Amino acid sequence: MDDPTMPPEPSPDAAPTVYRHRLATRLWHWLNAVTIVVMIGSGIGILNAHPRLYWGRYGANFDHAWLDLRPWSGFLHSGWVTIPAGYNLAISRRWHLLFALVLAFGLLAFMIASLTNRHFQRDLRVRAKEVGPRHLWADALAHLRLDFHNPDDPAAYNILQKLAYVAAIFVLIPLMIFTGLAMSPGIDAAWPWLLDVFGGRQSARSIHFIAASGIVLFVIVHLTLVILAGPVNEVWSMITGRWRLPVPAEPEPKPQAEPAE
């Protein structure tokens, strides 16, 4: 008789799994999934107040703008992309500033946890040989073939993944945080040097927009690759931490030679 207290034996046809995403990574991922959506929607709501971007300390209606988004006003004022759905600068700012705190403290907690559990050193460390032109080109070709995993170590991050995550975690999100602080009058009073670092309030606003656009591009590429790599397995691994290894394709049987007469 089978012992009911013992777990069932895995099916021989079941693909093996590995523990790929630690708890801190999963929590930060889903926290950011909400935070980034709210910040993009509320950020567009703020941008609608003056959809022109400048370089330097000052910028107004009659100054030269390096980017004029007024031709996109129909899209920018769409209720399905802004928070709130109707134009309300005060409410957009409240939502944006609230979730900016969530983004900043979430990033800090994630960095501390990732240094402690060695996630950065183990999974995101970029080695010199990986950024060589030959290696980058081979990884790009593999992506075009929809081959995202190294058969020798399928759970490892490929170099394009590493570069994308490093850019988002250590460049784009910190830039959004510090340029956002530079645009705050209260922070400017306490840390006037912060505006000088970014070349003025309008330059900080432009860099803030560029970094946010980089995050939007990252999200679009990330979601596309999740769909192409198998959304069920990828999303389930970000919930449970366990990722099912891809089953290698079986080689086609070689035709047998016909016996000689």
Image: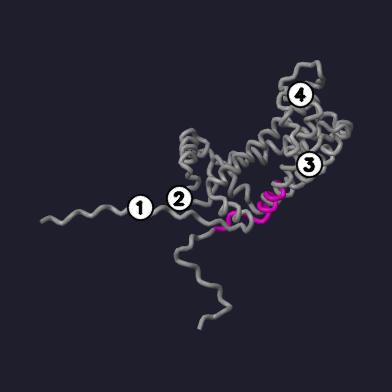
Q: Residue at x 80, y 33 (%)?
A: 46
Please give the range of residues in magenta: 18-32
**Mark whose residue sits in front, 2 or 3:** 3
Q: What separation in Å lies between label 3 and label 4 (alpha carbons)? A: 22 Å
Q: Please name the amino acid that badge 4 sits on.
A: Arg
Q: What separation in Å lies between label 1 and label 4 (alpha carbons)? A: 57 Å
Residue 29 in the magenta stretch? The answer is: yes
Q: Give the SS element for disc 2.
A: loop
Query: Which residue in the structure is indicated by mark 2?
Result: 151
Query: Which residue in the structure is indicated by mark 4?
Result: 52
Q: Give the SS element for disc 1.
A: loop
Tell me residue 45's x, y (percent): 79, 34
- Among the two numbered marks 1 and 2 on one chain, the one whose residue lies closer to the N terminus: 2
Q: Tell me the quarter of the image containing the C terminus.
A: bottom left
Tell me residue 197's x, y (percent): 77, 28
In the image, residue 13 sits, relative to residue 204, either above or below, namely below
Q: Residue at x 60, y 52 (%)?
A: 235
Furthest-bottom residue in view?
A: 1
- Among the two numbered marks 1 and 3 on one chain, the one whose residue lies closer to the N terminus: 3
Q: Give the SS element for disc 4.
A: strand
**Mark whose residue sits in front, 1 or 4:** 4
- Among the two numbered marks 3 and 4 on one chain, the one whose residue lies closer to the N terminus: 4
Q: Give the SS element for disc 3.
A: helix
Q: Are marks 3 and 4 in contact (CB under 8 Å)?
A: no
Q: Residue at x 46, y 35 (%)?
A: 134
Q: Please name the amino acid that badge 1 sits on.
A: Pro
Magenta span: chief secondary structure = helix
Choose top left, top right, bottom left or bottom right for residue 12. Answer: bottom left
Query: Which residue in the structure is indicated by mark 3?
Result: 100
